[in-house]
Amino acid sequence: MDILTEALSSMRTGRPTSVRTDGRAPWGLRLPPVAGAGFHVVLYGTCWLVPLEDAGDQVEPIALSPGDVVFLRDGRGHILADHPSTPAEVERPEQFQPGSPIGTVRVGGDGALTSLLCGNYHLDQGRPHPLVRQLPEVIHLRTRHGHHPELSAAVQLLGAELENPRIGSDGIVPTLIDSLLLYVLRAWLEVQPPAAAKGWAAALGDSAVAPALAAIHDNPSAPWTVESLAERAGLSRAAFARRFTALVGEPPMAYLTRWRMTTAARLLRESDTPLAAVAAQAGYGSEFAFAKAFKREYSMAPGGYRRQTRTA
């Protein structure tokens, strides 16, 4: 079971949106916070990302070069500019070419050109998966000079399709942007030094916790107990519970319940599966028990949740 893919899929509320931003020095754009997670890919040139002062933890300005990728976990507000001291104007409305899935924004003077792909992933930040919640607020990855070869390849493919659109580009570009999020997070998780890794970065590579997480994700409806998960992990019940809680951030049964409810919510949002079948797939023997647990987690009954998400 690919836990990273499952975790992101559980949070997605729509396809990513993106815009090609071309700035000529001097230029600066003030980008407001967005729902979900933001991203930028530097296709050509250089620029700076300057987090806004009121956007949470303070982060120093980040110098960006060709091939750099930035992921903003909470879609925090920030400034993009040719230099940190350049005044920033408010975000401009993007313009769309007929049939193009990506808008364009042009800003600045007549100096050096910087071209970026900017956008956001629509993620439910009201109920973030703990894997995403534990990520740094800003992830900056460099893909040049042999760093993160798969991510680098995705960036190069995006750049090529945007620079020279051909037959099929309208289908290829959105798919590459959609996949970029997985490449970014995989690259970040894999770059963590084993000795320094903690939280989910350590849990996914832990010889005891990773098999238990895979079992929960692979079959959430199974009658798991701390004992049965500890047996898969090859640890005693107490040792497994301590290790799982320390890395994942919550006890095994709490995470199991969270994932069962997440699985049920996705079924309610995305399918017409009868409530009895949703309850069974979430590991509950009766609709009543399932409805009670779901209401405790989402503050509404399963039927009401389905109606609300279908009309939102």
Image (spheres, rainbow, N blue to C red):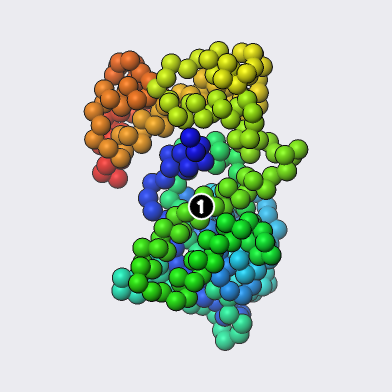
| Vertical comparison of 170 with 59: above or below | below
Task: Point out residue 286 in the picture as x, y percentages from the top left corner.
Answer: 30, 15
Query: What residue appears at the point 49 percent right and 26 percent down from the top-left corner?
Result: 215
Query: What residue appears at the point 46 percent right and 72 percent down from the top-left corner?
Result: 162
Q: Is residue 292 visible?
A: no
- In the rendered image, which residue does mark 1 sit on? 181
Q: Is residue 39 visible?
A: yes
Task: Point out residue 70 in the picture as x, y percentages from the top left corner.
Answer: 59, 58
In the rendered view of the protein, which quadrant contains the C terminus? top left
Query: What residue appears at the point 68 percent right and 55 percent down from the top-left corner?
Result: 59
Task: Point out residue 256 in the picture as x, y percentages from the top left corner.
Answer: 48, 24
100 sits to left or right of 187: left
Q: Secondary structure at mark 1?
A: helix
Query: What residue appears at the point 43 percent right and 16 percent down from the top-left corner?
Result: 223
203 sits to left or right of 180: right
| Vertical comparison of 43 with 224: above or below | below
Q: Nearer the viewer, residue 38 or 301?
A: 38
Quadrant of res 197:
top right
Q: What's under tag 1, amino acid-wise?
A: Leu
Task: Point out residue 264 in the picture as x, y percentages from the top left corner.
Answer: 36, 30
Q: Residue furthest right?
A: 195
174 sits to left or right of 246: left
Q: Tally the marks.
A: 1
Q: Nearer the viewer, residue 75 or 135?
A: 135
| Vertical comparison of 56 with 246: above or below | below
- Near mark 1 (Cα within 10 A), the count class, few <14, some 14-19 or many ≥20, is many
Quadrant of res 146:
bottom right
